[in-house]
Image (cartoon, helix red, strand yellow):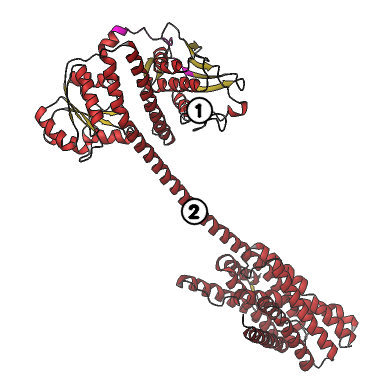
Amino acid sequence: MNPARSGSNRLVTAAIAFLGYLAAADAGHALGLSLAPTLIWPAAGVALAAVYLAGPEAVAAVFLAEFVFIFFENAYPLWVALALGLASALAAAEAAWLLRRFAFHTGFARLSDAYLFIGTVILSAAIVPTVGIGSLVLAHQIPLSAARSAWGSWYVGVLFSLLIVGSFLLRWLPKLSFSRTRREWIEIIAVEGAVAALALVIFATPYGNLGGVPILYLLLLPLFWTALRLGPRMTTLALALVAVISVVGSIARFPGGTLPAAVFAIELLIAVLAIIFIITMAIAEERKDATATLRRQLVRLEALLDKVRREDEAKNDFIALLAHELRNPLAPLLSSLELVRLTEADQRTRSTVNAMRGRVRTMARLLDDLLDLSRIERRTLSLSTEQIDLCAVARRAAETTEPLWREKRQRFEALLPAEPVGVEGDPVRLEQVVVNLLVNAHKYTGEGGRITLTLAPEGAQAQLSVADTGVGILPEALAAIFAPFSQGEPGKRVGGLGIGLALSRHLVEMHGGTLEARSEGVNRGSEFVVRIPLLPESGRLPRKDRTRELKRLAPARPLSILVIDDNRAAADALVALLAHVGHQAHAAYDGASGIKKAERLKPAAVILDIGLPDLSGYEVAGTLKEHGLEAVLIALTGFGQAEDKRKALAAGFSYHLVKPIGLADLAPVLREVARKRRPKLKR
């Protein structure tokens, strides 16, 4: 900063403070300094605002202005003028220091600002009359007997000035300009006009009552309106209007003898009103600020929620796309493995193929778990329930996980009842639960360990448990064991995604049951217990004729089938598998060639991949329908969510299969096609 310019600025500031204080002192003297000895002293408010806003250089200006006014205008002794000058400067400096020390804000935006300002001026207002009355008594300007009443009059006059003039200047001077809408200007003019009009009637006319009720009460209405709606600027302006009108009106109305008492009472009244409405406007501003802050936080919260929703949708889309891309290479693997399994091969080859099939299906199951958990979070997962035998479900789950036991030479035992255990449930989802529990037991049990699958009716419930002799669960971890992506002890990952148990609990609860984890501690093994309501009657299903069941799944008759898939390995493997079981199968590797082959071959069924390179599966299906092809359309895709099924149905597909698929998935569909059943969308 340029020192010369800085000094010049300080000089200008001091000059403005000096002239402003002197003008206010002259105005007070003209109105009523001679009353007793002062009731009206606007210079005190000017001094406070000048020192607070301009800084230390205004202190000297206040001292000099007060000294000049007292010494030259009133002809008091020099030492009295010096004492009063020092007192005025000290009062302004003390008030400004307290306000700055406790972070006062001139906008009166907080209730603490109002309390600080009121407390400060009440304290500072005592300095000038105390020094002034003491000096005047010592100078024999007033008798000692009159000191007490004179001090009270002077104190009220200074306090009145600090509350009215001080608050007005502190609020208006930092920023003189402000903008309002036309509607707001109309409201301001109407309310401030009402304040001025009522003040004129009350203080400048003899009509202070209306039907025996003081009109002063009516003045409170526009003052409250101003404090609550128009803010601190208009409130301090309204208080200033009331103060000026009341003082000037009183001087005009009351004769000299009664004027001091009248002005004293009016100043005391206005000072009390000022305290009330300064607090009220601060409360209103704090409330407005809190409301604005809450609105901003709500907007921010809505933006964050929207961001979370978008990220969640992006996550689900990514998971679906990832599952699709990972399923594509699994499809030819599974088809090829099933073809090898069905051909004549030695026992060792079949054993290897079975192990590989198990790994492929495990990969597919992990992908399904990931998608199912996403569906549960969005509440879009549904069940296809029927009366089923939970024994058969547990048996299939044990067969699916059989290669795992041999891999780690674990001892597996299934204790299943001879009679069926009937429940109302989704067989696919319940098998998924049991497989998840068995895989979990396998992962956390070492070589040579024992795993036991038990099922038995317990009262009105079927109780299925999977117990192991593995690493066990810490007591504090039992509560969080079913959280998504949890894998027991931190830092001990044993493979998988950590979602199997979370998904299993959700699926069991969707069946009206419970899933509970038990463990006696580390290296003491663990047990997971599933309880599902039995069927209402006996809880038993009749034994199924397995020969009849296998016959029902066998091909009804050979069909002409066209497979359209851009994944050549997957298409060729599926064609070979279909041909092996007796169907006439053909392959096409893009949408355009698939349409041409379909028109030439007129197949009974078209197994159509959705994600083709040239045309989408939906477009191919639409073209085939337009050309009058009567083939049953079977969607084969890596996308398996509910929305994907709805799109397939709308595009004309009769079935929706998710990669990878085997004969167990295709056989029921092809039998329905062979029997010319009415098509319906299935998984």
Residue receiving disc 1: 494
Is 500 magenta? The answer is: no
Is 542 magenta? The answer is: yes
* Labelled pair 1, 2 in contact (Cβ < 8 Å): no
Residue 162 is marked as none
Q: Amino acid at mark 2?
A: Arg
- Residue 112 spot, x, y in % from top left: 67, 63
User: Quadrant of the rendered structure where residue 596 is?
Assistant: top left
Q: Is residue 205 visible?
A: no
Outermost residue on the top side: it is: 418
Magenta segment's dominant SS is loop
> In the rendered picture of this protein, how many numbered marks are placed on residues?
2
* Helix, strand or loop status at disc 2: helix
Q: Quadrant of the C terminus?
A: top left
Q: Is residue 667 visible?
A: yes
Instruction: Tell me the distance, in whole angstroms, between the alpha carbons under discs 1 and 2.
Output: 40 Å
Q: Nearer the viewer, residue 287 or 489?
A: 489
Q: Bounds of the magenta span?
A: 531-547
Residue receiving disc 2: 300
Q: Residue at x 86, y 77 (%)?
A: 148
Q: Is residue 410 above or below residue 162?
A: above
Q: Residue at x 11, y 27 (%)?
A: 602
Left or right: 366 as drawn, with respect to 121: left
User: Quadrant of the rendered structure where residue 433 is?
Assistant: top left
Q: Residue at x 86, y 85 (%)?
A: 136
Q: Quadrant of the N terminus?
A: bottom right
- Residue 527 spot, x, y in % from top left: 54, 18
